Amino acid sequence: MDSKLKNKLNKRIEEGTLRSLSSFEGAIDFFSNDYLGLSRVKFESEYPTQNGSTGSRLISGTSKIALSTEEKLATFFGTESAIIYNSGYDANIGFFSCVPQRGDTVLYDEYIHASVRDGIRMSFAESISFKHNDIIDLERKLEKLTGTIYVSIESLYSMDGDIAPLKQIAEICQNHNAYLVVDEAHAAGVFGENGKGLVHQEEIEKAVFARLVTFGKAYGSHGAVILGSKELIDYQINFSRSFIYTTALPPESCNRIGKVIEYNQNETQRIRLQEIIVFFRETFKEFNFSSDIHSPIQLLEIGDVEKTKELALKLQKVNFGIKPIYSPTVPKGREGLRICLHAFNTEEEIDQLYCNF
């Protein structure tokens, strides 16, 4: 392997942040994104004999169930149209690499997901960040920009577990004629009426140009969807490379997406999840969590790689599935434990976790 690559690996080793793959099957789950436990729900298969999609969407990969699921998603989330991607990562790089054009500017929250950053890098647009959830900095930078502007945010941030000031950002974008793009990967399924997400409020929805929803998190499935106008979706079908040049999701995956959307309209799991979050915050009230009090993602900042690693290993040894978070996933100095809460967690499990801290 080239020496430049070896040096990068060695630097991670020296910093104590080298990542490796490990399985936590059987451990008490405080680390997965399966917030509602829907990955455990089995649905009857309508495609017992077809396991593959056989091609890309523009060739043979567009099944009847893919089209009907996209229609169902557009109706459910209240948009004109929808387009399914293989993952949230594919959706973000597909959108941001083809929609913003040369001469346009993408103004993004400094904590935006890596998939958005990668998509921006693949485009010909200019880009600039604004301070995390800082509406003053956002407006200040918008006032200095000209031309077509896209503002990219997450509604619920995947590492910190904090919620964006959506109403204020939506209003600012409308005042400056900026196109607002909201990643709802971690909010959809958990928040809003029937799990429609944090954007599902009239004064916000009308200001949103495009919305991303993923199905591999609270929905316990796989794939993602970009929601927007029919014109926007038609554009992506023709120009989004991560949609055009990849094998489509198999019909069974699309079938599951449609079924889990319907299943999740029952409020039972969302109510139980909020009960668990309240119990967790009360139990750990002496700790300084930076996350929103209603968020299933609770980040305990430690700020030191070795201390973070020691605490994670200590908890893992007593069968808690918890992962340490290091740079570059979070900025240096913000290392910590990302604790994910679920509707299937119990008060006893949280008490046990607390006793082992």
Image (cartoon, helix red, strand yellow):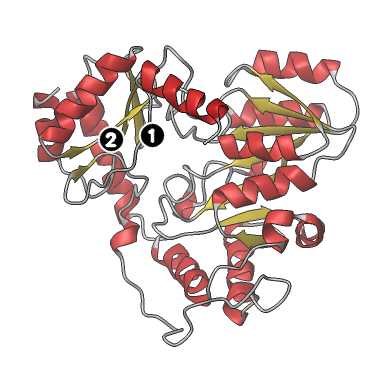
Which disc, if any, is residue 277?
2
Q: Is residue 180 visible?
A: no
Front-most of 5 and 226?
Answer: 5
Rendered image quadrant of residue 139:
top right
Q: Residue at horizontal 54%, vertical 27%?
A: 3
Q: How many marks do you count on the picture?
A: 2
Residue 9 higher or lower than 202, as above or below: above
Q: Which residue does the numbered mark 1 point to in the structure image?
A: 295
Amino acid type shown at disc 1:
Ser
Q: How crowded is mark 1: few (under 14 residues within 10 Å), some or many (20 or more)?
A: many
Instruction: Name the element at disc 1.
Output: loop
Q: Where is residue 191 in the image (x, y as percent from the top left)?
A: 45, 44
Q: Position of residue 255 (x, y in %)?
A: 49, 74
Rendered image quadrant of residue 62:
bottom right
Q: Residue at horizontal 19%, vertical 28%?
A: 313
Q: Residue at horizontal 86%, vertical 33%?
A: 104
Earlier along the polypeptide chain: callout 1 or callout 2? 2
Whole-Å distance between the Cαs marked 1 and 2?
7 Å
Q: Do the residues labelled 1 and 2 touch (CB within 8 Å)?
A: yes
Residue 167 higher or lower than 81, as above or below: above
Q: Where is residue 22 in the image (x, y as percent from the top left)?
A: 28, 43
Amino acid type shown at disc 2:
Ile
Front-most of 233 and 193?
Answer: 233
Residue 44 higher or lower than 198, as above or below: below
* For residue 128, side relative to residue 344 (left or right): right
Rendered image quadrant of residue 202:
top right
